[in-house]
Image (cartoon, rainbow, N blue to C red):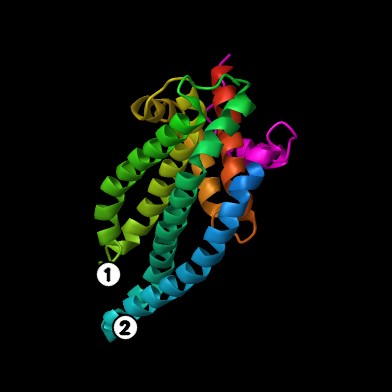
Amino acid sequence: MLIPDLPLSGPACLWRGFRCLFDRRWRALVLAPLAINALLFGAGSVWAAGRVAAAVRWLHDALPGWLDWLAFLAWPLFGLGLLLVFVYAFTALANLIGAPFNVILARRVTGDVTPSAGGWLREAGQAMANELRKLRYFLVRAVPLGVLLWVPGVNLVAGPLWLLLGAWLLALEYLDYPLGNRGLDFRAVRGTAAAMPLRALGFGGSVLVLGAVPVVNLLLMPAAVIGACLLVRSEERA
């Protein structure tokens, strides 16, 4: 029996990830990244809010008076696009630091508790190297689209595309943990996500939204790892 590819399935798995967050089987693996997130998002949120406000003011001042109406339409999308840049940048940094914990967390959730042959240090190095590969994938696609955010008028289209790209990238970010533990490389992870596009985008979109919510974003990384494991499990049962 096939499970319908519904966008709400993704947020439902993320919600279950939050509910299972402090299960005693992986509680310690959640608390360590939580401390990292508290430091990163505390400082990053203050800095990002100021940069977004400054960028929106720049857009308004850059347009001639007769295009004020365009600024009124463009600034929300422009602000959201820039917010996405900051949210994903700090998420990527948190995941880079927390990757060794997340790999083990995904293994605990899926029930695969067999350690790698190279030991924890080698596994940690491989996890961080994989995060850098994902960051490269993001930058190759984000930089050209990010340039369009600074072009008045064009950013009306670039803003929604940014949100769509962000949802997709965050889905790949977290699906890579359970799928990587099954031996899939990043290309195969992208193929798996593409086979369930609505669920993947729904999951990534909910991560994106919650990444901008204070306090909630502190718990987001481990909850998203758990949620991605549950999403993969539901796909395997299809």
* 91 is within the stretch colored magenta: no
Residue at the image position 51 percent from the left and 34 percent from the top: 199
Tag shown at residue 165? none
Q: Secondary structure at mark 1?
A: loop
Please say if the residues under marks 2 and 1 sit with CB atoms less than 8 Å apart: no
Extent of the magenta region: 1-29
Local crowd size for mark 1, using a 10 Å CA cut-off: few (<14), some (14–19), many (≥20): some
Splitting the image into 4 quarters, where does residue 216 fall? Answer: bottom right
Splitting the image into 4 quarters, where does residue 231 fall? Answer: top right
Is residue 177 depicted above or below 96 in this figure?
above
Amino acid of disc 1: Pro
Residue 26: % across, % down? 68, 34
Q: Secondary structure at mark 2?
A: helix
Residue at the image position 59 percent from the left and 33 percent from the top: 105
The residue indicated by pointer 1 is 152
**Camera-side residue of 83 and 67:** 83
**Camera-side residue of 33 and 65:** 33
Residue 212: % across, % down? 54, 59
Residue 158: % across, % down? 32, 57
Number of marks present in the image shown: 2
**Camera-side residue of 71 and 206:** 206
**Camera-side residue of 174 and 28:** 28
Tag shown at residue 61? 2
Q: Is residue 30 left or right of residue 84?
A: right
Quarter of the image for the N terminus: give it.
top right
